[in-house]
Image (cartoon, rainbow, N blue to C red):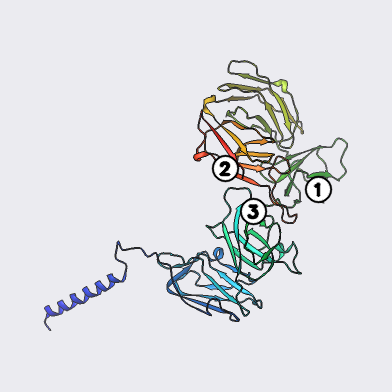
């Protein structure tokens, strides 16, 4: 063989190899693969009866991956020991499910994979794949359907469990705290509807749970719950609406601790409104105390004077059906200093109060040491109210548009319970905006049941403005800062001027809440108003 021929053969071989390698991939600019994987077979077959295996294999026509299995996989009824599902992360052409739990007799099981199964290359999901089998002679085929809504917010949560508890001789209301449900499904990340399938005929309690620790049991402190007002009978043609709500936790007090000199912190869970702190230890006749609330934390502070030469103090904390004694260790520590701050600086709203807040409890205030003038140096009358719980003096005075106000507070106007006094002169400069800087909204309510709380909220649901209505008539919101608002209406059934959530054990549903948007999704603009009818169906 000549050298020229050898070189020709070598070049031809390399060219063919290069072409074959290039043909293995998708040509650049070719169509993207959007086809989900296809199941070739399952061993045992899907919808098998008299199932007695401990391993399941599901084969696909291409390499697949499993993602977010912990969130996506729902097994109904739940198993005490979770099965092992492979592959965990690497690609494979089959899924293996190894069951280590003892299966119940004559029971239909369903493995709901959600959107966790995808092809390896493009991530195309095999949507809502379900593997079903029965340990008995037949597959249960009934179902319960419905919709999840949030009792208070406009949009419901995602990944909400919806479950059925069988109502039999062992049923009690406490079952949601102790046992896993008979049947369960999940709304996943994009749906508000649910369908619990492969259910057998019977009587059930229908409930939903935003289960934050994944144990399929209700944890009052962390989870949200919904429940149907009565038991349901399956089969049923009804579609159910479940309102998801957060309960107020049952009240409990935490062990008190000395926070600083003569200041003891009492942490709590639940509603503190009726919380009382009584000292049981013997104290001198001149003993006095004050209770204030932390601005952010669920804590009440118990301040006392004079200083006591003791190692501990005994208290009783009570609240409605709660009562418990606590011992707080006492040591000599430095007291907090009196520091004053204002609630607002610079621009103040026409209807906004001005507050002075103290870091230690106020004992007295001398309003003769306060002067307030406007931009024309005219004295402005004011009055004050004292909010003892938040340790704030509220200054009330009539404001006008596009005006300036100067407040001066001379030394020794404020004194705290430790006889600390304000030593500096305090000066505050406040100003209001012109009337044309604001917008307004007027609502006419149709078919409304009173009383109502009408709120304007931002996109996060935070209340910016609020009105309370007890009878028919137009509802006006004046002096609105320009911006985009949502309209939330609370149907205050018990007339206590606040939203009341539900209670599972007391079988109380949360108060009804309606949501509206401004016409044409308009936002409030300066020197402009929105007039709208809110129709309650």
Per the image, the residue denoted by label 2 is 516
For the question of whether residue 191 can be seen, the reply is yes
Q: Secondary structure at mark 2?
A: strand
Image quarter of the C terminus = top right
Q: How many marks?
A: 3
Residue 376 vertical placement versus 157 (above, below)? above
Classify mark 2: residues with Cα within 10 Å, few (<14), some (14-19) or many (20+): some
Indicate which disc, 2 or 3, sits on the residue closer to the N terminus: 3
Q: CA distance from mark 2 to mark 3?
A: 18 Å
Q: Secondary structure at mark 3?
A: strand
Left or right position of 384 against 96: right
Residue 243: give its label: 3
Task: List x then y, in percent, for residue 239.
Answer: 61, 59
Task: List x then y, in percent, for residue 80.
Answer: 65, 71
Is residue 375 or residue 507 the one in the foreground? 507
Classify mark 3: residues with Cα within 10 Å, few (<14), some (14-19) or many (20+): many
Task: List x then y, in percent, for residue 398.
Answer: 65, 23
Please report the residue visible at 74 percent of the width from the left and 52 percent of the height from the top: 250
Residue 320: give its label: 1
């Amino acid at each position: 063989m000549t050298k020229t021929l050898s070189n020709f053969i070598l070049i031809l071989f390399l060219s063919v190899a290069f072409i074959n390698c290039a043909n293995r991939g998708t040509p650049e600019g070719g169509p993207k693969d959007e086809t989900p994987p296809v199941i070739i077979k399952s061993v045992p077959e899907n919808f098998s009866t008299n199932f007695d295996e401990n391993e399941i294999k599901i084969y696909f026509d291409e390499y697949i991956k499993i993602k977010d299995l912990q969130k996506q996989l729902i097994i109904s009824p739940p198993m005490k020991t979770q099965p092992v599902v492979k592959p965990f992360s690497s690609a494979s052409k089959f899924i293996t499910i190894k069951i280590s739990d003892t299966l119940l007799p004559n029971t239909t099981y369903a493995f709901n994979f959600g959107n966790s199964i995808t092809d390896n290359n493009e991530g195309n999901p095999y949507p809502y794949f379900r593997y079903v089998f029965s340990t008995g002679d037949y597959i249960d085929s009934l179902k319960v359907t419905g919709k999840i809504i949030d009792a208070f917010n406009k949009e419901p949560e995602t990944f909400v469990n919806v479950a059925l508890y069988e109502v039999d001789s062992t049923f009690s209301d406490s079952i949601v705290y102790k046992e896993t449900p008979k049947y369960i499904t999940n709304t996943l990340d994009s749906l508000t509807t649910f369908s619990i399938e492969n259910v057998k005929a019977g009587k059930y309690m229908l409930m939903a749970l935003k289960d934050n620790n994944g144990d399929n049991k209700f944890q009052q402190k962390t989870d949200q719950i919904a429940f149907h007002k009565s038991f349901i009978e399956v089969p049923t043609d009804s579609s159910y609406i479940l309102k998801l709500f957060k309960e107020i936790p049952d009240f409990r007090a935490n062990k008190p601790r000395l926070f600083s000199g003569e200041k003891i912190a009492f942490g709590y869970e639940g509603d503190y409104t009726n919380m009382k702190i009584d000292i049981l230890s013997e104290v001198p006749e001149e003993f006095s105390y004050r209770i204030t609330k932390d601005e952010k934390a669920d804590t009440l502070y118990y301040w006392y004077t004079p200083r006591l030469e003791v190692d501990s103090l005994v208290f009783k904390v009570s609240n409605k059906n709660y009562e418990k004694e606590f011992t707080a260790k006492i040591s000599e520590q430095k007291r907090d200093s009196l520091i004053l701050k204002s609630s607002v600086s610079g621009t103040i709203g026409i209807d906004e109060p001005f507050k002075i807040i103290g870091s230690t409890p106020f004992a007295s205030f001398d309003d003769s040491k306060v002067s307030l003038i406007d931009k024309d140096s005219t004295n402005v009358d004011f009055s004050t109210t004292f909010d003892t719980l938040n340790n704030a003096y509220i200054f009330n005075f009539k404001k006008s548009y596009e005006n300036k106000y100067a407040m001066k507070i001379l030394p020794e106007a404020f004194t705290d319970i430790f006889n600390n006094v304000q030593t500096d002169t305090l000066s505050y400069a406040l100003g209001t905006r012109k009337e044309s800087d604001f917008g307004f909204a007027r609502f006419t309510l149709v078919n409304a049941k009173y009383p109502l709380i009408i709120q304007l909220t931002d996109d996060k649901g935070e209340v910016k403005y609020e009105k309370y209505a007890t009878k028919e008539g137009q509802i006006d919101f004046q002096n609105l800062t320009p911006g985009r608002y949502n309209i939330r209406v609370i149907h205050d059934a018990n007339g206590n001027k606040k939203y009341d959530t539900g209670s599972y054990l007391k079988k109380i549903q949360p108060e009804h809440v309606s949501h509206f948007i401004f016409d044409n999704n308009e936002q409030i603009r300066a020197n402009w108003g929105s007039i709208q009818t809110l129709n309650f169906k």
